[in-house]
Image (cartoon, helix red, strand yellow):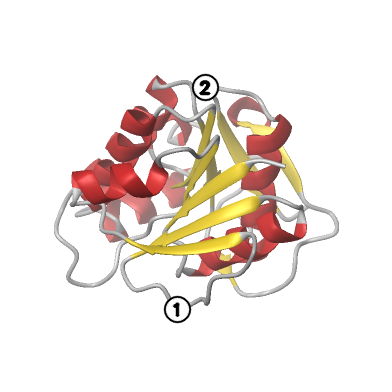
């Protein structure tokens, strides 16, 4: 059992990370701006903002594993994702895993033309923030699990995680559930490669 901190614990992927980490026997620190979960024997909800360096440092202190599931909300200032990644780097956990977008940064070349075009068009404002956050996690030897479009649903029974060079070429990546993404992130944190970009697929 490890002490696992989840950044963005109130989001779709973050809440799945909390649930699944507890089911795997870990002690969980669930970090969000407005915690909604009640504390239990192995769950500690913490209110903290990534732009508050001291508050985030306190929240992350003592966690062997940090799972970064931060996402951008409407109205968020630029740099939220990078600020979160830098906080993870500063905490120096034994393992760090973050969620990223397939078709950005290192995986841009592996994505199809349509995926790259849509990513550049619809994520234009936040793209530098996402790329910067991934670079920070990879630079500390952490792992980035990149995914295509996400949806609600259970963990895919046929799920798999591949390196960038092994991802099948498609016009557009298959949709993957938040639960499947969370499972891939936990697998990577517990026994996955370090310093690599992985891609979570439903099958």
Quarter of the rendering occupied by the N terminus: top right
Eyeballing the image, is 2 above or below 201? Answer: above
Q: Secondary structure at mark 2?
A: loop
Q: Position of residue 116 (x, y in %)?
A: 40, 46
Q: Residue furthest toward the front?
A: 41
Residue 130 is at least partly visible in this image: no
Label 1, label 2: how many angstroms apart (C-alpha)?
A: 32 Å
Going from the N terminus, do you reach mark 1 or mark 2 first? 1
To which residue does mark 1 refer? 36
Give the residue at x 78% y 61%: 156
Residue 195: image tag: 2
**116 or 203, which is in the foreground?**
203
Answer above or below: position of 16 versus 1.
below
Q: Badge 1: few (under 14), some or many (20 or more) residues near its Cα, within 10 Å? A: few
Q: Residue at x 61, y 69 (%)?
A: 40
Residue under the point 72% across and 31% down: 191
Seen in the image, is 79 located left or right of residue 187?
left
Residue 74: x percent and y percent? 23, 72
Place of residue 146 in the rendered image (x, y in percent of width and height, measured from the top left): 52, 44
**Picture mark count:** 2
Residue count near mark 2 (Cα–Cα under 10 Å), binned few <14, some 14–19, many ≥20: some
Q: Are marks 1 and 2 in contact (CB under 8 Å)?
A: no
Q: Residue at 54% across / 26% down in the picture?
A: 94
Question: Where does the image place residue 9, in percent across and percent down from the top left?
Answer: 47, 63
Element assignment for label 1: loop
Q: Nearer the viewer, residue 51 or 170?
A: 51
- Residue 71, image quadrant: bottom left
Q: From the viewer's perspective, is residue 105 above or below residue 121?
A: above
């Amino acid at each position: 059992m490890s002490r696992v901190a989840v950044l963005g614990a109130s989001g779709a992927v973050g809440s799945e990370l909390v649930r699944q980490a507890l089911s795997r026997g870990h002690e969980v620190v669930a970090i969000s701006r407005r915690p909604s979960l009640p504390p239990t024997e192995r769950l500690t909800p913490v209110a903290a903002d990534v732009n508050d360096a001291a508050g985030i440092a306190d929240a992350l202190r003592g966690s062997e594993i940090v799972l970064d599931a931060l996402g951008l909300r409407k109205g968020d200032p630029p740099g939220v994702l990078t600020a979160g990644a830098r906080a993870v780097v500063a905490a120096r956990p034994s393992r760090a895993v973050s969620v990223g977008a397939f078709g950005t940064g290192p995986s841009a070349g592996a994505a199809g033309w349509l995926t790259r075009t849509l990513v550049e068009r619809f994520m234009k404002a936040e793209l530098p923030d996402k790329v910067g956050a991934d670079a920070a996690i990879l630079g500390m030897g952490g792992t980035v699990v990149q995914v295509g479009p996400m949806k609600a649903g259970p963990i895919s029974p046929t799920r798999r995680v591949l390196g960038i060079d092994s991802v099948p070429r498609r016009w557009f990546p298959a949709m993957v559930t938040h639960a499947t993404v969370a499972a891939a992130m936990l697998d990577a944190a517990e026994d996955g490669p370090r310093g690599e970009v992985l891609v979570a697929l439903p099958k």
